[in-house]
């Protein structure tokens, strides 16, 4: 039985500096003492697949072995989805295809795995997407409004114990225009604006909401290494009280044990990070 339901919002390629400068709604919660905000150091390589796995397993890439995006395998270590499921809980995700691959079934089938209802994998209910391209001529691929509303629909229909909400738009825009661009900054603000509409609804439904990212983005539109802008990301815990900006920089490996501690579930030894709560 789960003590507290959790939603993790993962805004892909959201660097710490742009987050603090553009996320007016999330920063308002910090200023009002309703959320705690940490500066968090992403794992290396600062890439999606290594970081998605580490965010959910608390295990560094050098240990879990998923050290590139060019792998078609499932996460080989215990993770939040498997632990919630094994405890009898219900999980859900609105996320890019890599999440379906890591936590439900490999290889990913573009038709069969796009939607999961009452599935037998670690993600009980899944709404997955594959199109995250962004070009100057095709901005319509970005669906933060739909992503947040799909998450709200999952909350209404299935009331999952753990729900992952993953937006990949800032990553796509950042790769096209670079981190030092109007387009990237505006995309980050846009997601914050969608969260301003969605988070109060999720909190009213009884969820504790956490917001973070997998990695940052360099000025020239890249990530993967340790160059300026690639590793620091924000971590918000919208806990409702005793909020504020935390002075220390924490490891990304803290996310999974933090989620499990909030939910009242056991933290396995493979999780190297320490809970923030
Ligand atoms: Zn990227």
Image (tube, rainbow, N blue to C red):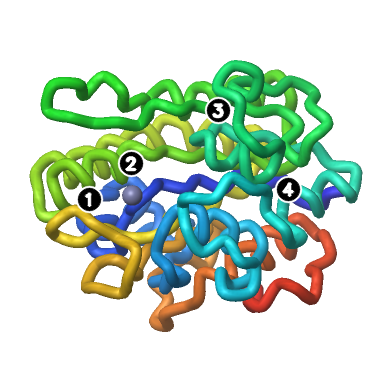
Quadrant for residue 88, please give it.
Answer: top right
Q: Tell me how far mark 3 sits from mark 2, CA to CA.
A: 21 Å
Residue at 58 percent across and 72 percent down: it is 60
Q: Secondary structure at mark 1?
A: helix
Where does residue 105 sit, x and y in percent of width and height? 70, 36
Disc on the earlier residue, 3 or 2 = 3
Which image quarter: residue 40? bottom left
Mark 2–mark 1 contact, CB under 8 Å? Answer: yes
In this image, 86 relative to 58: left or right? right
Whether disc 4's CB lies below 8 Å from ligand 1 is answered no
Crowding around mark 3 (Cα neighbors within 10 Å: few <14, some 14 to 19, many 20+) is many
Disc 3/disc 4 C-alpha distance (Å):
15 Å
* Percent of width and height locating residue 135: 18, 29
Q: Give me the residue at 84% from left, 42% from top.
A: 89
Residue 81's place in the image compared with 233, above or below, is above
| Nearer-N-terminus badge (4/1) | 1
In this view, the residue in front, 107 or 255, is 107
Q: Nearer the viewer, mark 4 or mark 1?
A: 4
| Residue 22 tag number | 1
Residue at which label 3 appears = 128
Which one is in front, 173 or 222? 222
Q: Of residues 32 and 129, which is closer to you in this image?
A: 129
> Helix or strand or loop: what does disc 2 sit on?
helix
- Disc 4 + disc 1, Cβ < 8 Å: no
Q: Which residue does the numbered mark 4 point to in the structure image?
A: 81
Seen as rendered, the residue at the extreme bottom is: 248
Using the image, determine if residue 62 lies above or below residue 262.
below
Residue underneath mark 2: 192
Q: Nearer the viewer, mark 3 or mark 1?
A: 3
Disc 4/disc 1 C-alpha distance (Å) = 30 Å
């Amino acid at each position: 039985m789960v003590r507290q339901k959790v939603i993790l919002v993962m805004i892909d390629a959201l660097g710490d500096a742009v987050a603090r400068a553009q996320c007016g709604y999330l920063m308002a919660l910090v200023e009002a003492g309703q959320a705690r905000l940490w500066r968090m150091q992403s794992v290396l390589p600062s890439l999606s697949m290594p970081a998605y796995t580490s965010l959910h397993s608390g295990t560094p890439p050098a240990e879990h072995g998923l050290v590139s995006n060019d792998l078609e395998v499932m996460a080989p270590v215990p993770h939040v989805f498997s632990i919630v499921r094994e405890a009898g809980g219900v999980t859900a995700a609105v996320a890019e295809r890599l999440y379906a691959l890591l936590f439900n079934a490999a290889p990913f089938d573009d038709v069969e795995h796009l939607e999961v209802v009452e599935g037998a994998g670690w993600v009980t209910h899944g709404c997955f997407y594959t199109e995250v391209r962004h070009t100057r001529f095709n901005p319509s691929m970005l669906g933060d409004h739909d992503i947040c509303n799909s998450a709200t629909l999952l909350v209404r229909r299935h009331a999952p114990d753990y729900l992952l909400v993953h937006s990949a738009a800032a990553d796509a825009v950042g790769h096209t225009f670079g981190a030092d661009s109007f387009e990237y900054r505006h995309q980050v603000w846009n997601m914050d604006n969608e969260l301003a509409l969605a988070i109060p609804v999720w909190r009213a439904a009884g969820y504790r909401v956490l917001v973070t990212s997998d990695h940052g983005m360099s000025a020239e539109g890249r990530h993967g290494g340790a160059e300026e802008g690639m590793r620091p990301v924000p971590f918000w815990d919208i806990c409702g009280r005793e909020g504020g900006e935390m002075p220390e920089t924490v490891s990304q490996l803290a996310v999974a044990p933090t989620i499990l501690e909030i939910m009242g579930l056991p933290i396995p030894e493979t999780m190297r990070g320490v809970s923030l709560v």
